[in-house]
Image (cartoon, helix red, strand yellow):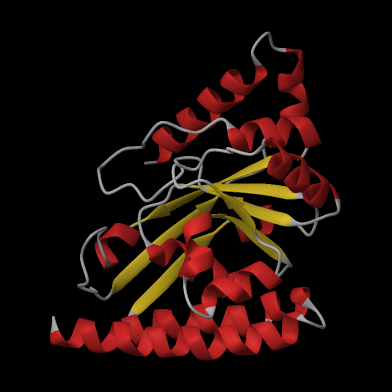
Amino acid sequence: MILSYAKWALIAILTAFFALLTILISLISPKFAALTTVKIWGKLILIISGVSLKIDGLKNIENKPTIVMYNHKSYYDIFSFASFMNYDWRAMMKKELLDVPFFGTAVKIMDHYFVSRDGSFSDRREVVKIIKKIKKGKIIFIAPEGTRNPEKGLLDFKDGGFYISLKTKVNIVPMIIKNADEITKKGSWKINPGRIEIKILPEINVIEYQKSKDPVNKLKNDIKEIFNSYL
């Protein structure tokens, strides 16, 4: 555990350092920050932690408006996709992260999206803002479970991401993450070296769902079934 505490201390220092760099760069170009300081930050955390990645299907994330949905088990989910994304991206985050020193300021200046602690959209005005931003071309990462899931299987998916997808006609790319919870579990400080496997699937055309009587639930259930089939 002593080694794990030392790793977390180093991760905290790196996060503060790169957050400050990201803030400065984002004042000029948030896109450049996402592709440089944020990417290096993710890579260094994985190296420090002794974590390797196996990525399959990265070509399925194209440089266009896309909603990438992933199963959320660990902070290492975020460290992982931050380390390999080749295009400008943003993520849906809990509002509480805005209170984290340095990090909160960085993600706010970069214009990430923020929701309530349970992953829901408590303010309709925020939904409208998110819809407008996505239409401008950003790739957005959303954890449809709304929070880290410490148990096996999946939590219930929240409606928000699916509603936004249908409203904007932006397709969904499922991203299956395995073993992230073996690196560090929710509620634990221990960091275990290992390999995270990420499988990125072809995009789901959401326009076909708009003819359904209950498009949000139909889309949500179909996406969850895809996740279950791979997990």
Residue at image x 22%, y 83%? Answer: 5
User: Can you give x and y, in whole percent of width and height, for residue 126 in the image?
Assistant: 69, 44
Q: Quadrant of residue 190?
A: bottom left
Residue at image x 40%, y 34%? Answer: 228
Residue at image x 80%, y 79%? Answer: 29
The outermost residue toward the top is 213
Q: Quadrant of the C terminus?
A: top left
User: Is 210 placed above or below 179 here?
Assistant: above
The outermost residue toward the right is 136
Q: Nearer the viewer, residue 157 or 47?
A: 157
Q: Is residue 205 visible?
A: no
User: Can you give x and y, in whole percent of width and height, for residue 158 in the image?
Assistant: 51, 33
Q: Quadrant of residue 187?
A: bottom left
Q: Quadrant of the N terminus?
A: bottom left
Relative to 182, is 147 on the left or the right? right
Relative to 44, is 187 on the left or the right? left
User: Is 191 placed above or below 54 here?
Assistant: below
The outermost residue toward the left is 1
